Amino acid sequence: GNTSKTLWTKYHPISDLPQYLNPPSGYLFNSNHSPFNATARTYNLLNKDFDPTMGFETNENNRSVRFMELLSPHERIDYLTFKKIKFDRQLPVDLAYSTNSDTLFLIRSADYPALSVVIDLLQNWDRKGSADSKGATVFAIIYYYVVDKLNAGDTSFKVLTKQKAVEVYTYANDYLQKFFKTTNVALGDYQKLVRGNKSIPLSGIPDVIASMQSAPYKNGMVKGTQGESYIELVKFTKKGPEIESIHSYGASNKKGNKHFDDQMEMFEKQQLKPMTFDKATIYKNAERIYHPQ
């Protein structure tokens, strides 16, 4: 507001924020979605109990929907099941993007012969962002095209009408033909993990649990810039914590160092390595011990 009647004169106390403490369900989760869906339904906080002027998000996204899909069959999960959920690269059955894209999966490829290959690739896609998926490539190209339009203020892309669906399919078809001379392109040939002069195929698409967002790279390819990065998992046992980790590149930021890019392949394969904070173990296995000057 712009009058004294609407001027804020005090702050909300922390107690006014949605807070959870050890819910009986035994788990909490968040993927930048609603705080009113953070654990089992029985123990979730209710939106109506909080001041609506504080602007809490109430939406779900693909990661939160997919997480619930994966968790719902289990009463308890073990560590291996947890890791499978964490590394999941599949979209949910019902998409939860801000754009309604249902029409993409409903139009008939037979009606558009020139676009039939890209239409069939997307419609037959298993919705997984694996490096060998050609449907994932078509989806990613369409996704970035729509996002660019929305970011430019074109709200007509909030719902993909039949006309819009044909437009984005045409764009994907032309893009692939221009840069790759074919429409059958695996995601790993389109999307790369890049560090210095090293480039390898990269899995993942935006808003899956193991998410990957990319930006233009070169020759029509894109490179991963946001999403999965440094990963550390800690399991608390009777013998103490057991730690596994991986970095998207390597432990060194110095070009020429062998650890500058030596974790890239493991990262792409979703492999983890043992890690410890035990000083004696660190010193025992250290390649070099020195004191910075």
Image (cartoon, rainbow, N blue to C red):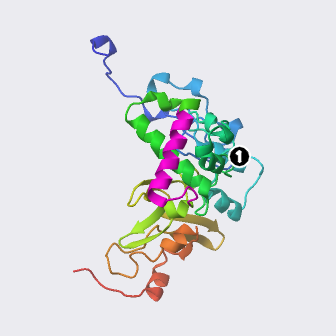
Magenta: main secondary structure equals: helix
Identify which residue is drawn at 46% across, 67% down.
Answer: 248
Label 1 crowding class (10 Å Cα cut-off): few <14, some 14-19, many 20+?
A: few
Look at the image and tell me in which quarter the C terminus lies. Answer: bottom left
Q: Which residue is mark 1?
A: 69
Image quadrant in which you'd find residue 274: bottom right
- Horizontal and vertical percent for residue 34? 56, 36
| Residue 72 lies in the magenta-colored region | no
Left or right relative to 281: residue 258? left
Residue closest to the eye, 50 or 88:
88
Q: Quadrant of residue 204?
A: bottom right
Q: In the figure, 231 relative to 290: above or below?
A: above
The N terminus lies in quadrant = top left
* SS for dot 1: helix
Residue 144 location in percent, x, y? 46, 46
Q: Quadrant of residue 218?
A: bottom left
Percent from the top left, x then y, of residue 115?
59, 45
Q: Magenta stretch? A: 164-185
Res. 34 in view: no
| Residue lying furthest front | 113
Percent coordinates x, y for residue 196 in the rendering: 35, 71
Q: Is residue 5 above or below residue 104?
A: above
- Name the one closer to the observer, 6 or 120: 120
Report whether residue 185 is seen.
Answer: yes
